[in-house]
Amino acid sequence: MVLTLGPLAYTRDSCVTGPGAGSGKIRFPSMSIQSTLSLAKRTLRLDDEVRFIRSWMEEPLATGAVMPSGKPLARAMAKCVDPDMGGPVIELGPGTGAVTAALVEQGIEPSRLVLVEFNPTFCRLLRTRYPEATVVQGDAYGIKRLLASLLRQPAAAVVSGLPLFTKPLKFRLRLLADAFTLLAPGAPFVQFTYAIVPPIPRSYSAFG
Ligand SMILES: C[S@@+](CC[C@H](N)C(=O)[O-])C[C@H]1O[C@@H](n2cnc3c(N)ncnc32)[C@H](O)[C@@H]1O
């Protein structure tokens, strides 16, 4: 058995030390399980940041951010979703899965997740991380056509990290209108945007 953490690799033999050796107990020489896990998490996070920067350099407008969302933002988004409400949870622009992870942490079964992502590299990553989720590679602005045959019941939420400001208002409004046709009554559309004004002007009270 080989446990690989970024540049480090422990083989079973090199990990067995001290009084536990030979008795089947495995001991890590200088790292506790907790610090090993925390190193793994940091390595994962760093990998995601590198993927994001690369994607942003290739397509800055479509990627919309230089870094994946941090945990506090991801958790704040996920908190808006009621895990007890039935139906799929649709995520638009999941990227490397920062908000996806918070949704799962919030109690949403990965099998309920429908992840709509433009970037094929991010889609591959999401399929590896969430094999039970439905990952749809495509343009979220065509959500109605993309998901019409996939959804068997109204969605419990649409959670979006799309960089809405890169599209004209007309497109944003159509996306919202289409998303609401897929949502159960009372289910939320959750969006984060880094800007001093909301991407949907308050005057559009139908969406307020
Ligand atoms: C600002 S990032 C947010 C990523 C992730 N939700 C997070 O919080 O870390 C925007 C994401 O939306 C994706 N995206 C942009 N336009 C899209 C579109 N039209 N359809 C689907 N995904 C899109 C980008 O590839 C990127 O992964």
Image (spheres, rainbow, N blue to C red):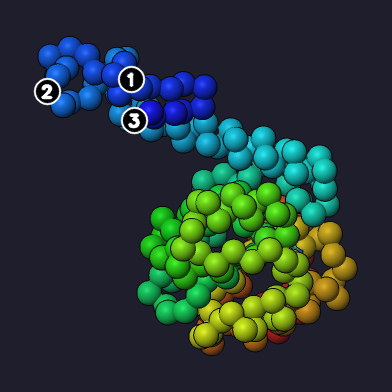
Q: Which amino acid, by three-letter code, is at mark 2?
A: Ser
Label 1 crowd (10 A; few <14 / some 14-19 / many >=20): few
Q: Which amino acid, by three-letter code, is at mark 1?
A: Met
Q: Secondary structure at mark 3?
A: loop
Q: Secondary structure at mark 1?
A: loop
Is residue 48 shown above or below 42? below
Q: Residue at x 52, y 22 (%)?
A: 7
* CB of mark 3 near ligand 1 (< 8 Å): no
Is residue 177 shown above or below 62? below
Residue 18 lies in what quarter of the image?
A: top left
| Camera-nearest residue between 162 and 10 | 10
Q: Which residue is mark 2?
A: 23
Q: Between disc 1 and disc 2, whose residue precedes?
A: 2
Q: Residue at x 42, y 78 (%)?
A: 85
Residue 167 lies in what quarter of the image?
A: bottom right
| Camera-nearest residue between 62 and 76 | 62
| Camera-nearest residue between 198 and 120 | 120
Q: Which amino acid, by three-letter code, is at mark 3?
A: Met
Which of pointers 1 and 2 indicates the residue nearer the eye? Answer: 2
Q: Report the Cα–Cα distance between label 1 and label 3.
A: 18 Å
Placement of the N terminus among the 4 image quadrants? top left
**Residue 185 pos. (x, y %):** 54, 87
> Residue most toward the top?
18
Is residue 188 shown above or below 35? below
Q: Which residue is mark 3?
A: 1
| Camera-nearest residue between 64 and 186 | 64
Which of pointers 1 and 3 indicates the residue nearer the eye? Answer: 3
For residue 119, side relative to residue 166 (left or right)? left
* Residue 99 shows up from this direction: no
Q: Which residue is mark 1?
A: 31
